[in-house]
């Protein structure tokens, strides 16, 4: 092997390692955000006398259907009910039984308008024992309009790629001989399309408004998008022309990762039931 081939092999391997690291960071942050978000189903296990019961309770549903609550409980000596009311309303608590269908106990929470929320408890009864699956904490379920797959899938994919290129740009900037500027342009383009074009379209389908962040509201998802874009525009500004500021690439990527790790839909669109008809 000639000596001039070894350095190019090392450089190629180095680039692949950085891409691998960027993918790991991106996937880890996406999984964390998904599993800690307020719309991710609540899962758990409880024990009622001698019966172990696993459950998964919804925290998100579309506006075109009632939200199902289903528990697989073959033991026919166990019954239950759901206590619920509209979130942050003046409603009194309502109650409905969990009806048995074979091995399943089920009930359906009434559908709500987009951004409407219902808070609910699920109770199970056996003999003289009554047990709340989530103890003293109610579950909050938010309704949203259905988003066409032709819009939602490109939005998710492009946002994932934007985060991937953001992380890759920062890793490239850590090397004094790296060339992060070209990766920065791809990051900004992807983030602009995914976050500022497709993002508002998704928001419109889901909640009826294109933008509910600053200056029109406090929707954290929209504000996260705005902060992330400003961070990368700052990196572009400090590296325009012949200027070189590697720290600004790292700052923009860390800022985007930090806001991305905030659970999705926190402080999201919410219908104020005190201002609508019952």
Image (cartoon, helix red, strand yellow):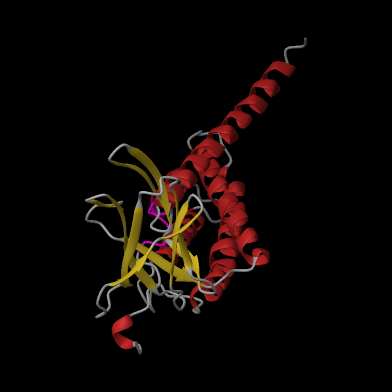
Q: Residue at x 56, y 55 (%)?
A: 159
In the image, is 44 to the left or to the right of 153?
Answer: left
Magenta range: 257-266
**Secondary structure character of the magenta stretch overall:** loop
Q: Is residue 34 above or below residue 175?
A: below
Q: Is residue 273 above or below residue 201?
A: below
Q: Is residue 237 above or below residue 48?
A: below
Measuring from the top left, give residue 275's x and y in whole percent.
31, 87
Question: Is 122 in front, or is 233?
Answer: 122
Q: Is residue 262 above or below residue 141?
A: above
In the image, is 278 to the left or to the right of 228?
Answer: left
In the image, is 135 to the left or to the right of 39?
Answer: left
In the image, is 110 to the left or to the right of 15?
Answer: left
Question: Is 85 in front, or is 148?
Answer: 85
Q: Residue at x 36, y 70 (%)?
A: 118
Q: Is residue 32 visible?
A: yes
Q: Is residue 231 magenta?
A: no
Measuring from the top left, give residue 108's x and y in whole percent.
45, 67
The quarter of the rendered structure image containing the N terminus is top right
Measuring from the top left, give residue 155's x and y in whole percent.
60, 61
Residue at the top extreme, as displayed: 1
Q: Residue at x 45, y 79 (%)?
A: 113
Instruction: Using the rendered view, name the quadrant where residue 18 is placed.
Output: top right
Q: Is residue 260 magenta?
A: yes
């Amino acid at each position: 092997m000639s000596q001039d081939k070894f350095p190019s092999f090392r450089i190629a391997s180095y680039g692949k390692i950085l891409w691998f690291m960027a993918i790991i960071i991106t996937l880890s942050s996406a999984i964390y955000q998904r599993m800690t978000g307020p719309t991710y189903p609540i899962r758990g296990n409880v024990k009622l006398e001698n019966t172990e019961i696993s459950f998964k309770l919804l925290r998100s549903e579309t506006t075109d259907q009632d939200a199902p609550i289903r528990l697989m409980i073959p033991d026919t000596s166990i019954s239950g009910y759901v206590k619920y009311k509209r979130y942050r309303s003046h409603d009194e608590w309502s109650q409905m039984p969990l009806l048995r269908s074979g091995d399943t106990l089920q009930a359906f929470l009434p559908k709500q308008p987009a951004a409407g929320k219902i808070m609910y408890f699920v109770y199970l009864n056996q003999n003289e024992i009554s047990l709340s699956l989530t103890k003293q904490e109610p579950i909050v379920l938010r309704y949203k309009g259905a988003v066409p797959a032709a819009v939602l899938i490109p939005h998710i994919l492009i946002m994932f790629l934007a985060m991937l290129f953001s992380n890759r740009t920062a890793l490239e900037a850590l090397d004094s001989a790296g060339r992060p500027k070209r990766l920065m342009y791809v990051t900004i383009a992807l983030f602009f399309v995914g976050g500022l074009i497709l993002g508002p379209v998704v928001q419109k389908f889901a909640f009826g408004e294109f933008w509910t962040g600053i200056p029109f509201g406090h929707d954290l998802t929209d504000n996260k998008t705005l902060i992330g874009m400003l961070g990368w525009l700052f990196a572009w500004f400090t590296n325009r022309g012949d200027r070189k500021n590697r720290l600004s690439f790292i700052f923009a990527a860390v800022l985007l990762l930090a806001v991305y790790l905030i659970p999705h839909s926190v402080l999201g669109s919410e219908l104020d039931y005190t201002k609508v008809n019952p």
